[in-house]
Image (cartoon, rainbow, N blue to C red):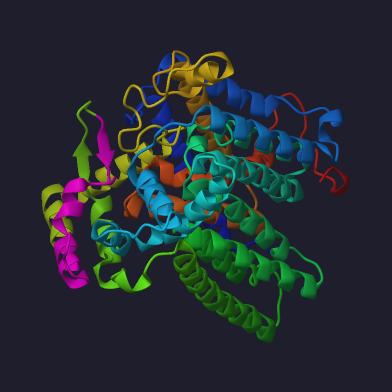
Amino acid sequence: MESPVGRALLRLTGASLVLVALVGLIAPRAVNVTHRWQVVLPVTLGLVLSALLVRLPAWAKTRWTPVVVSLAGGVVATFVGLMTRYHYGWDARVVMDMARAVQAGRALGAADYDYLSMYPNNLPLLAIDRLGAAVSGTFSLAPDAVLVPVNGICVAVTLYAVHLLVARAAGRGPSLVAQLVTLVLVGTSPWLAVPYTDFYAMPFVVGGVALAVKALAPGRRSRRVLLWLLAVVAVSVAYAIKTTPVVIAIAAVLTAVLAIFDHDLAAGRRAGVVAACAVSSLAFVALGLGLSSAATVASGVDASRIDASTSPPLLWWVALGADEQRAPGGIVNYGAYSREMVDAVAGRSQDETKAYAAGFLADRWAERGLGGTLAFYGDKAAWNWGDGMFWAWGEGPDSLPGALAPATGLTGLVHEVNGFHGSAYPLRADLTQALWLAVLLVAGAGLLRAPYRRETVLLAVSVLGIAAFTVVLQGRSRYLFAFVPLVVALAAVAHGSLPRLGGRRGRVSRSSR
């Protein structure tokens, strides 16, 4: 039995992905790197055509292939991250400097506690950075020399989680392709050089969804309950590290509720599933709060000096997401970070900040009207989703010349390819952009034809959730980065619904999964 709501969610997600991909091909919104359509357009179309024609040989789908790809991917990611190390700025540097100070026994100043009061979500990052500083001090290394390899480990675990997620639904061939595409988009990114929450949360994001998919599949009840509990724990850890994974918790509960109507169940069983979802939601909240408290303790800060009353309310983040700024180079930032708005609420109470945000939103509505508001958020979605480099080198002063120290040999080669001012970076960015847009097109077109399946709905609603998060609240393409493996997995699963050119598409057998 199909769920009409589930099927409608698949179509909505598919249409949204196709639309933002087409805008990215035909009328892209400028990001911090200029893409050349002469390269992006033909490569994107070539990759989509390859997805319809090419099939992997049997020798590439052995049981050990996913393990080898995951381990090799972790090594590649670690190498790229270490070779691309630079003196990053923005929040990553602010938190790292705090971590080094705390680990060295130095007291944080008033400005530091003002920052943590405004952004308490960075306390888990502070705890991780402090641990990195402690380990690095033992070996007389810089914290980045310890934490960048942690990014590589996160990539390796993520790649294997992608395999587990895709292989069950689509088979080993699509899972291998999903691993390789994830490796290119995530495991070679310049972001590998920055110790930040995106990579730390990523394995728990993908792993949580993979566990939830297995829990939603038919099987022994005790095993499914255990898998569901593990999924709750994984997503709670992801949420404690980074706020955005909250959308996965919502998607999992929604998918579970839809699942009770896709086959005949007694009223009592349905009520039991709804009750289990309610308990899971409470457990998610409790675990999230508990992990956040533990992170505060592990960070080593004086919790009494963190003033929660000055942390901005949700409405302020919505107001930030409605702001439009024009950068010096002419690039329009849709709902990104605004220093002016941050300074405007400095020292205000939550009620005062809420009043400021409400007034700001009212002014934007009066200025834009309904049509202008829809156009703004449409531009914002296209801007966020139309950047295959995910705002690499776009934060703070990271893109300034000299961010990367001069280098030769392999390090110099990596700088030329991955450095913002590297000679090969424009081509690298164009090819990556083409791959990303091809992923969006395959995922979107496949979802427009895909039948209702629980794992597909969970993936689609998770992707739809992060899209809504980045459209409504402050965000930019970097906020999508931790979810890129899920988008790739969705494309791999939806790919089976596309028409196969040059022959019939066979069904996926259990032995190939």
Range covered by the magenta-colored residues: 331-358
Q: Where is residue 262 in the image (x, y as percent from the top left)?
A: 66, 67
Quadrant in which residue 299 is drawn: bottom left
Point 49% across, 47% down: residue: 198
Task: Answer whether residue 449 is visible to the viewer in this image.
Answer: no
Q: Where is residue 228 in the image (x, y as percent from the top left)?
A: 67, 68
Point 54% across, 40% down: residue: 141
Point 23% across, 26% down: residue: 329
Looking at the image, is 369 positioned above or below residue 492?
A: below
Point 72% across, 60% down: residue: 214
Camera-nearest residue between 399 and 302: 302
Point out the residue furthest to the bottom here: 268
Let me know if residue 337 is in the magenta part. Answer: yes
Quadrant in which residue 116 is drawn: bottom left
Task: Answer whether residue 480 is visible to the viewer in this image.
Answer: yes
**In this image, 169 relative to 16: left or right?**
right
Q: How many labels does the image show?
A: 0
Q: Where is residue 168 in the image (x, y as percent from the top left)?
A: 75, 50
**In this image, 323 relative to 96: left or right?**
left
Q: Position of residue 66 (x, y in %)?
A: 77, 40
Which quadrant does the N terminus fall into?
A: bottom right
Camera-nearest residue between 83 and 12: 83
Let me know if residue 46 is in the magenta part. Answer: no
